[in-house]
Image: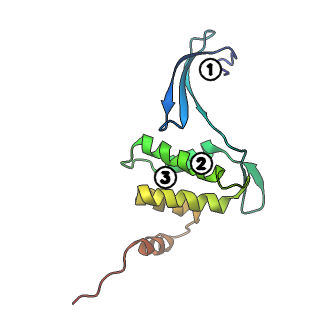
């Protein structure tokens, strides 16, 4: 593994342990050239996924991009980082087990929204505001009103 600090390719593993509920291995590494320490994660990849964007463009699936967007929606929310990691791993496993290598970006967005709705409604609304491209406060109001249970008439 290449050192992110000096580029040396001969780094050493100092410690390994399971991470993300045993779906990844966390490795602490050391670079003998510069003394830098860094962490890497090793995960099983069942297949190479390709995302088909709404404009028809194709790009390789990037777990890090998915993770960044989920973590942005979860900022300052009372959800443990381990739970977020498990959710992201679950989303990736679900995508990989769909049987298709080409996956529509809309499908990915729906799966992420479904997972966020189960964990934190604020993160769900945040993600939806970007995913559904809200343009005005009315868009938020309409979306949030659909989340609320219908009011019971007074007796």
Q: Earlier in the sequence, mark 2 or mark 3?
A: 3
Number of residues whose C-alpha sits closer than 10 Å to that of mark 2, classed few (under 14), some (14–19) or many (20 or more): some
What residue lies at 39% left-to-right and 43% top-to-bottom? 80
- The kind of secondary structure element at disc 2 is helix
Q: Looking at the figure, which quarter contains the N terminus?
A: top right
What residue lies at 65% left-to-right and 62% top-to-bottom? 106
Q: Nearer the viewer, mark 2 or mark 3?
A: 2
Res. 10 image quadrant: top right
- The kind of secondary structure element at disc 3 is helix
What residue lies at 67% left-to-right and 43% top-to-bottom? 46
Q: Nearer the viewer, residue 83 or 141?
A: 83
Q: Position of residue 55 (x, y in %)?
A: 75, 62
Q: Is residue 139 above or below residue 126?
A: below
Q: Is residue 20 left or right of residue 65?
A: left
Gap in Å between the C-alphas at discs 1 and 3?
30 Å
- Report the residue marked by disc 3: 73
Gap in Å between the C-alphas at discs 2 and 3?
21 Å
What's the mark number on residue 98?
none
Q: Is residue 22 left or right of residue 4?
A: left
Q: Nearer the viewer, residue 35 or 86?
A: 86
Number of residues whose C-alpha sits closer than 10 Å to that of mark 3, classed few (under 14), some (14–19) or many (20 or more): many
Q: Is residue 8 above or below residue 107?
A: above
Q: Position of residue 142 (x, y in %)?
A: 47, 75
Q: Earlier in the sequence, mark 1 or mark 3?
A: 1
- The kind of secondary structure element at disc 1 is loop
Residue lying furthest top: 32
Gap in Å between the C-alphas at discs 2 and 1?
31 Å
- Report the residue marked by disc 2: 93
Asked whether the beta carbons under mark 2 and mark 3 sit within 8 Å of each other, the answer is: no
Q: Is residue 127 visible?
A: no
Q: Is residue 102 visible?
A: yes
What's the mark number on residue 5?
1
């Amino acid at each position: 593994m290449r050192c992110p600090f000096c580029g040396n390719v001969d780094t050493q593993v100092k410690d390994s342990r399971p991470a993300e509920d045993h779906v990844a291995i966390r490795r602490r590494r050391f670079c003998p050239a510069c003394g830098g320490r860094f962490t890497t994660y090793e995960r099983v990849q069942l297949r190479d996924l390709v995302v088909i964007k709404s404009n028809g463009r194709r790009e390789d699936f990037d777990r890090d991009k998915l993770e960044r967007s989920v973590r942005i929606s979860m900022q300052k929310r009372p959800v443990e980082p381990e739970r977020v990691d498990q959710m992201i791993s679950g989303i990736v496993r679900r995508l990989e087990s769909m049987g298709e290598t080409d996956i529509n970006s809309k499908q990915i967005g729906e799966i992420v929204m479904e997972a966020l709705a189960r964990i934190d409604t604020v993160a769900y609304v945040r993600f939806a505001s970007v995913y559904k491209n809200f343009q005005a406060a009315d868009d938020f109001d309409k979306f949030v009103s659909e989340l609320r249970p219908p009011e019971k008439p007074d007796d």
